[in-house]
Amino acid sequence: MTFEEVFKENLERSELWLIITFRTPYGPGETMDVMVKELEKLGWKIEFKANWWTADVPYGLIRIDASYNGKEKIILGKWVLGSKYEIIKVDNMEFEEGKEEFFRMVDSITSTLIHDPVIRTMREQY
């Protein structure tokens, strides 16, 4: 399954959060760029994007807030470094459940990120 297939099957669902767990052969920046390009190809406008990852263990989290024809979606990419792209799991979550998953993942990357002003601002928004 590809990002394009996942997006086509899930972006029109009613849940706010789309959470994709996958392997990637690329680093954080390039991996986020791949997701952004696929969303833009489908006509979605990127409103916000951010990327958090660990230095010790090769995994991280991508957050993309996107909109299309008045519909909003938050896409979380939970990634781990691998030899090729491979979608492991796809979840759709309502607001509260997705928000908790997002904070849990950020906290799991490193507790020091909570002191980051971007994270504090995002926490205040939700």
Image: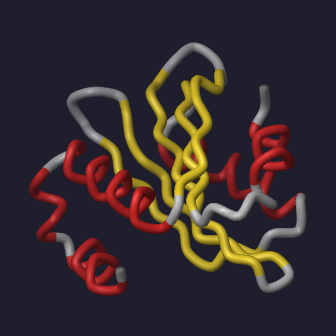
26 relative to 99 in the view: left or right: right
Q: Is residue 72 left or right of residue 109?
A: right
- In the rendered image, the quadrant that contains the N terminus is top right
Q: Residue placed at 75% from the left, 78% from the top? A: 71
Q: Relative to 88, is 68 above or below?
A: below
Between 85 and 103, the residue placed more toward the observer is 103
Horizontal side of 55 relative to 96 (left or right) equals left
The image shows residue 115, relative to residue 111, as above or below, that is below
Residue located farthest toward the top when viewing the structure as drawn:
83
Viewer-nearest residue: 123 or 95: 95
- Residue at 24% of width from left, 44% of height from top? 109
Horizontal side, residue 115 vs residue 50: left or right: left
Colour pattern: secondary structure
Q: Position of residue 70 (x, y in %)?
A: 79, 85
- Count the marks: 0
Query: Residue 42 appears at what percent x and percent y?
Result: 89, 60
Tell me what residue is drawn at x 35 percent, y 28 percent: 58
Q: Residue 50: percent from the left, percent from the top?
A: 46, 63
* 20 lies above or below 80: below
Where residue 91 sits, quadrant-wise, is: top right
Q: Residue at x 35, y 80 (%)?
A: 126
